[in-house]
Image (cartoon, rainbow, N blue to C red):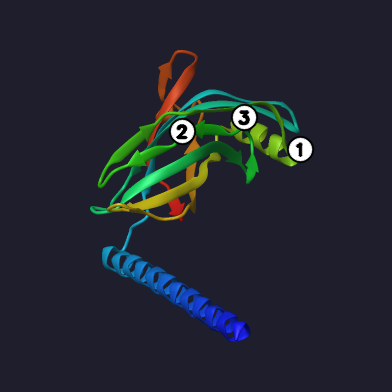
């Protein structure tokens, strides 16, 4: 008799557990469905970045395989969404030349960007005696002596989260690429002397991938 009672209780517990699991799965499904429908209706747009200017304090080749750089850039970020906010996790800014990193990472602290909002950042990116491939140092020296445009790229890497109402998504990687060509010392693009540096107006859009 006791075996039958135990078996009955076990079956009852099993059914209750299955019911709880089914309810939980149904609730998760409903939440995911609501999020997906909201996402499809709102159609989030990627943030837009613009490189406004660059102030060159140093860009020196001390040896064929060593470059020292000190640049301050002004970057404008715009959230084009009218119903979606953006949480930027830490953003890392750095410069590259010929696809090789020539500065250390500069961190932009976490920030929230509301609907249609703008943020402007002016980080310094620098690197002292950064080792590079010898042919890149030689190429940069040649470009400087020829007075040709120096093609470098300002990059921003990090993560962001989308905010829709009270819902916040998981983190997504964001990669921003801002190519810039500057003719140092060129009379038509001499820039503005700012202390020990020269400021160049650029106002150029950047490519963004999320």
| Crowd tier of the residue under label 1, counting other residues whose Cα lies within 10 Å: few below 14, some 14–19, many 20 or above | few
| Crowd tier of the residue under label 3, counting other residues whose Cα lies within 10 Å: few below 14, some 14–19, many 20 or above | few
Secondary structure of the residue carrying numbered label 1: helix
Instruction: Check contact, mark 1 vs mark 3: CB within 8 A.
Output: no
Secondary structure of the residue carrying numbered label 3: helix
Residue lying furthest left: 82
Closer to the chain start, of discs 2 and 1, is 2
Residue lying furthest front: 1
For the residue pair 168 and 25, the one nearer the viewer reads as: 25
| Crowd tier of the residue under label 2, counting other residues whose Cα lies within 10 Å: few below 14, some 14–19, many 20 or above | few
Which one is in front in this view, the residue at disc 2 or the one at disc 1? 2
Horizontal arrangement in the rendering, residue 38 relative to residue 175 (left or right) = left
Tell me what residue is drawn at x 48 percent, y 52 percent: 171
Position in image of residue 177 (x %, y %): 49, 47
The answer for how far apart the CA atoms under marks 2 and 1 are is 34 Å
The image quarter in which residue 134 lies: top right
Vertical position of residue 80 compared to residue 193: above or below: below
Residue tagged by mark 3? 145
Closer to the chain start, of discs 1 and 3, is 1
Residue tagged by mark 2? 109
Numbered circle sitting on residue 134: 1
The answer for how far apart the CA atoms under marks 1 and 3 are is 17 Å
Horizontal arrangement in the rendering, residue 82 relative to residue 25 (left or right) = left
Horizontal arrangement in the rendering, residue 73 relative to residue 102 (left or right) = left
For the residue pair 126 and 164, the one nearer the viewer reads as: 164
Closer to the chain start, of discs 2 and 3, is 2
Position in image of residue 166 (x %, y %): 30, 52
Which one is in front in this view, the residue at disc 2 or the one at disc 3? 2
Vertical position of residue 161 compared to residue 187: above or below: below
Secondary structure of the residue carrying numbered label 2: loop
Horizontal arrangement in the rendering, residue 71 relative to residue 86 (left or right) = right
Numbered circle sitting on residue 98: none
């Amino acid at each position: 008799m006791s075996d039958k009672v135990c078996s009955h209780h076990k079956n009852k517990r099993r059914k209750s557990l299955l019911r709880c699991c089914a309810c939980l799965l149904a609730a998760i499904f409903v939440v995911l469905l609501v999020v997906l429908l909201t996402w499809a209706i709102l159609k989030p747009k990627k943030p837009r970045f613009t490189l406004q200017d660059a102030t060159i304090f140093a860009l020196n080749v001390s040896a064929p395989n060593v470059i020292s750089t000190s640049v301050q850039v002004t970057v404008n970020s715009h959230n084009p969404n009218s119903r979606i906010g953006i949480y930027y996790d830490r953003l890392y800014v750095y410069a590259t030349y010929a696809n090789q990193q020539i500065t250390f990472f500069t961190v932009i602290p976490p920030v929230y960007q509301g609907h249609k909002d703008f943020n402007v950042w002016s980080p310094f990116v620098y690197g002292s005696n950064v080792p590079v491939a010898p042919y890149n140092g030689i190429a940069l020296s040649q470009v400087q002596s020829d007075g040709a445009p120096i093609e470098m790229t300002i990059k921003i890497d990090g993560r962001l989260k989308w905010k829709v109402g009270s819902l916040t998504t998981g983190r997504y990687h964001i990669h921003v690429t801002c190519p810039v060509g500057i003719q140092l010392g060129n009379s038509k693009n001499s820039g503005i002397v700012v202390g020990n540096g020269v400021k160049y107006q650029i106002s150029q859009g950047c490519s963004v991938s999320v």
